[in-house]
Each structure stands twice: as structure tokens, then as C-alpha cells.
Image: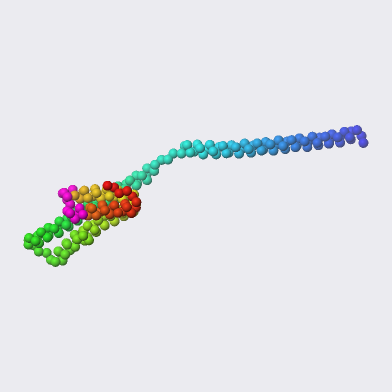
Amino acid sequence: MSVNGVTSVNAAAGYSYVSSEVTKENTKAEEKTSSQSKAADTGVVYEHSEETTKASAKKATYKPDTNLINKLQAETEARTSQLRSLVEQLMGKQAKTFGDATDMWKFLKNGDYTVDAATKAQAQADIAEDGYWGVNQTSDRIISFATALTGGDPDKIEEMREAFKKGYEKAEKTWGGKLPEISQQTYDAVMKKFDDLAAQNGTTVAK
């Protein structure tokens, strides 16, 4: 074998060895770089996520739903207005019916005029305790209407109670003074039924 041949073989082997070592080093370097890059990336994502969450929490603001508030307020005012109006009409009608019946008894007693038995019986029945304009039925209608207006919401009981009071006061003003005894008894019955509703629902009774 010639010297040139040996030299070429040795050179080739040396080159192959060096190339192999360089390749290994490059591979290790790439793996290290890749590992560092992943670690760095992971760290960045984690830190960014945490800081973003904190920042979002700090920046979060809670604004009242003005439209909903206005809507609920309008509904509440409408309900209380309806009940006040109903109470004024009911109590006024009850008082008038009672007055008419009472006047009728006075006229009958004085002999100023006479009425047929059916009319007399109807008048007596209307203002009887359980009559349509009596204490029980009138107070029941008021409570039923108040409950219907609120959908049975126990938190609205006192609101309806106040509306009833105002309606009763308006009825007195329209009447021109204190309403007849039957209406005062109806007032007491309604207040008692509001108390019962409050007690059933565990709410505080207004005094």
C-alpha cells in the first residue's frame, strides 16, 4: 500500500470521527437549548397567566343594572298604586253600602217608607260579617289582591301593608272623616291577615 493510500484512509477515518463528535455535540447543544426553551416557555406561560388573572381581578368592575332597577321600581310603584286604588274603592263602597243600609233601617223605623222583603234581606246580607261587603269577604279580597300583585313574594308583604294603609286613608278623606265601624273592623282584619302572612313566611312584622 502506498503512503498516499494510508494517508487518505487515515484522513477519512479522522474526518469521520471528528464529524461524529461534532454531530454529537451539536445534538447535545440542541437538546439543551430545546430543554431550556421549553422551560422558559413554560415559565412565561405560567407567569403570564397568573399575572393576567390578578390584573383582571383588579380591573373587574361591577355596575348596577340600571334598566332592571328602573323596571322593578316601576313595577313596584304600579302594584302599590293599584292596591291603594282598590282599597280606596272597596272601603268607600263598603262604607256607602253600610250607610245606605243604616239609613234604610232608620227610615223603616220611622215609617217614612217601606221596602220589599227581598231588598231588605239583600241589604242585611251584604253588610253581614260574611256578606259581600262584610268584614271577612272585604278583607279577604284585599289580601288576595295584594298577594296576586306580588306573586306571593314574602319580601313584599310590608310594602303591600303600607299601600293598604294609604288606600284606607284616602278612602277616609273621600268619605269626609272616619269611616263607619264596619270599615274600621275591616281595617283591623286586613292588618291581622298581613301579620299572619308575615308570620307564615318568617318575615318581620311592621309595627
Say whether residue 14 is magenta.
no
The one of 6 and 156 positioned closer to us in this rendering = 156
The answer to whether 58 is drawn above or below residue 76 in the figure is: above
Q: Residue at x 16, y 57 (%)?
A: 98
Label total for image: 0
The one of 90 and 153 positioned closer to us in this rendering = 153
Question: Residue 122, image x and y in percent?
Answer: 17, 63
Q: Is residue 144 left or right of residue 66?
A: left
Q: Residue at x 32, y 52 (%)?
A: 199
Quarter of the picture holding the N terminus: top right
User: Which secondary structure class fits the magenta region best?
Assistant: helix
Residue 54 visible within the image? yes
**Span colored in magenta:** 173-185
The answer to whether 139 is drawn above or below residue 35 in the figure is: below
Q: Residue at x 13, y 58 (%)?
A: 102
Tell me where residue 45 sits by quadrant.
top right
Tell me where residue 101 sits by quadrant.
bottom left
Question: Residue 185, image x and y in percent?
Answer: 21, 54
The one of 28 and 179 positioned closer to us in this rendering = 179
Say whether residue 183 is magenta.
yes
Question: Residue 177, image x and y in percent?
Answer: 16, 49
Question: Residue 86, image x and y in percent?
Answer: 24, 53
Residue 145 visible within the image? no
Q: Is residue 24 left or right of residue 169?
A: right
